[in-house]
């Protein structure tokens, strides 16, 4: 007998065709959401993939700033976020108004903005970066003084790779903060052959225990290496679904079972279905903000 989830999948597939829609799922989404997506990846990668399609509707299964990024890059498309409450606590730790006030005290500093931020904050920044390209972006800037927003831990990690003076906004990811050094040391003892790979949003004492520090996309590529059979994964647990699906013969161990982003898990099959049925909630970045934010994103893409 067909269950409600199976019916939802069928209706989503039908509506996707009728609406000429593409479904994007971030690596941290529920497994069932990743399984119905056309693309699974990190936030910027997903928006870039959507821009290359002829889809008229983008269903972004992620959090609000990600849907905004899709709206920035694809202004002519309808961007839907299946749960309007799916926000990012770190992105909410800085506002455009706060950044404007801080910039007045640092007239010579370049503002480098992590993509995990609102469109309005991007619009007040000189250039964006991702966790994968942050080091390269900063190394290629002419400015010697950098104000890095909003993630202090990604900023601190980048500062170990450059001789530029860096100032950090006191933001952080609450989910990555749940991964503690004792989690890593305990799992290393239990799995001595495993590689420890953590996200640069992790706290410095966790980063110091890792074999490699990588973005989610970097982790997925790392998992494909022939010399990796066991991997302790220091990021949000949703990525484990993708890793196990793509590499069924390998073992992937979450650094902490508590590293779950509740906002990422708000999106369900039935919310995706309702979003396609009602064509809402829609995320649309105002044109003035969009154009300014796109300058910062374009500078990043040109730099790397």
Image (tube, grey):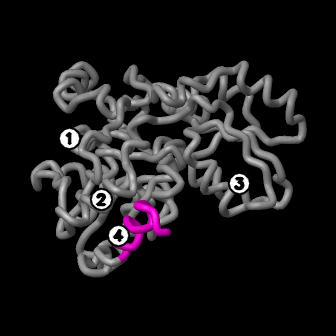
Is 204 left or right of 66, judged from the image as shown? right
Can residue 40 be spotted in the picture?
Answer: yes
Q: Position of residue 231 (x, y in %)?
A: 76, 45
Q: Which-is-in-front pick, marks 2 and 4?
A: 4
Mark closest to the chain's N terminus, 2 or 4? 4
Q: Name the residue under label 2.
A: 70
Q: Position of residue 216 (x, y in %)?
A: 57, 49
Mark closest to the chain's N terminus, 1 or 3? 1
Mark closest to the chain's N terminus, 3 or 2? 2
- Write the start and end of the magenta stretch as one range: 1-13
Mark closest to the chain's N terminus, 3 or 4? 4
Image mark for residue 12: 4
Q: Position of residue 68 (x, y in %)?
A: 26, 51
Is residue 8 in the magenta section? yes
Q: Name the residue under label 1.
A: 120
> What secondary structure is found at the residue carrying circle 4?
helix
Is 1 left or right of 92, judged from the image as shown? right
Local crowd size for mark 4, using a 10 Å CA cut-off: few (<14), some (14–19), many (≥20) = many
> What secondary structure is found at the residue carrying circle 3?
helix
Q: Is the magenta stretch mostly helix, strand or loop?
A: helix
Q: Distance between the residues labelled 3 and 2?
A: 26 Å
Q: How far apart are marks 3 and 4 (CA)?
A: 32 Å
- Give the farthest residue toward the front: 1
Is residue 72 in the magenta section? no
Q: Distance between the residues labelled 4 and 1?
A: 32 Å
Q: For residue 122, what is the image quadrant?
A: top left
Local crowd size for mark 2, using a 10 Å CA cut-off: few (<14), some (14–19), many (≥20) = many
Image mark for residue 222: 3
Local crowd size for mark 3, using a 10 Å CA cut-off: few (<14), some (14–19), many (≥20) = some
Q: For residue 142, what is the image quadrant?
A: top left
Is 193 left or right of 301, judged from the image as shown? right
């Amino acid at each position: 007998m067909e269950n409600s989830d199976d019916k939802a999948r069928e209706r989503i597939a039908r509506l996707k065709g009728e609406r000429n829609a593409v479904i994007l799922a971030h690596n941290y989404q529920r497994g069932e959401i990743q399984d119905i997506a056309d693309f699974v990846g990190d936030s910027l990668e997903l928006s870039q993939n959507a821009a290359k399609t002829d889809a008229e509707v983008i269903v972004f299964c992620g959090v609000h700033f990600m849907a905004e990024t899709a709206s920035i890059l694809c202004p002519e498309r309808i961007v839907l976020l299946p749960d309007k409450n799916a926000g990012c606590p770190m992105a909410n730790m800085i506002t455009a108004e706060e950044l404007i006030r801080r910039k007045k005290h640092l007239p010579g500093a370049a503002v480098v903005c992590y993509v995990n931020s609102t469109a309005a904050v991007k619009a007040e920044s000189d250039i964006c970066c991702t966790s994968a390209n942050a080091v390269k972006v900063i190394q290629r800037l002419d400015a010697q003084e950098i104000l890095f927003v909003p993630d202090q831990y990604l900023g601190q990690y980048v500062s170990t790779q450059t001789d530029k003076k860096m100032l950090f906004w006191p933001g952080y990811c609450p989910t990555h903060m749940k991964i503690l050094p004792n989690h890593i040391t305990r799992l290393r003892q239990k799995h001595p052959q495993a590689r420890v790979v953590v996200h640069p949003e992790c706290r410095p004492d966790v980063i110091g225990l890792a074999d490699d520090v990588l973005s989610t996309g970097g982790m997925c590529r790392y998992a494909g290496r022939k010399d990796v059979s066991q991997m302790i994964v220091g990021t949000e647990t949703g990525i484990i679904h993708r890793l196990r699906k793509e590499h069924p013969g390998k073992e992937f161990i979450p650094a902490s079972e508590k590293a779950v982003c509740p906002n990422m898990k708000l999106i369900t099959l039935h919310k995706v279905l309702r979003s396609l049925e009602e064509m809402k909630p829609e995320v649309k970045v105002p044109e003035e903000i969009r154009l300014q934010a796109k300058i910062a994103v374009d500078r990043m893409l040109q730099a790397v």
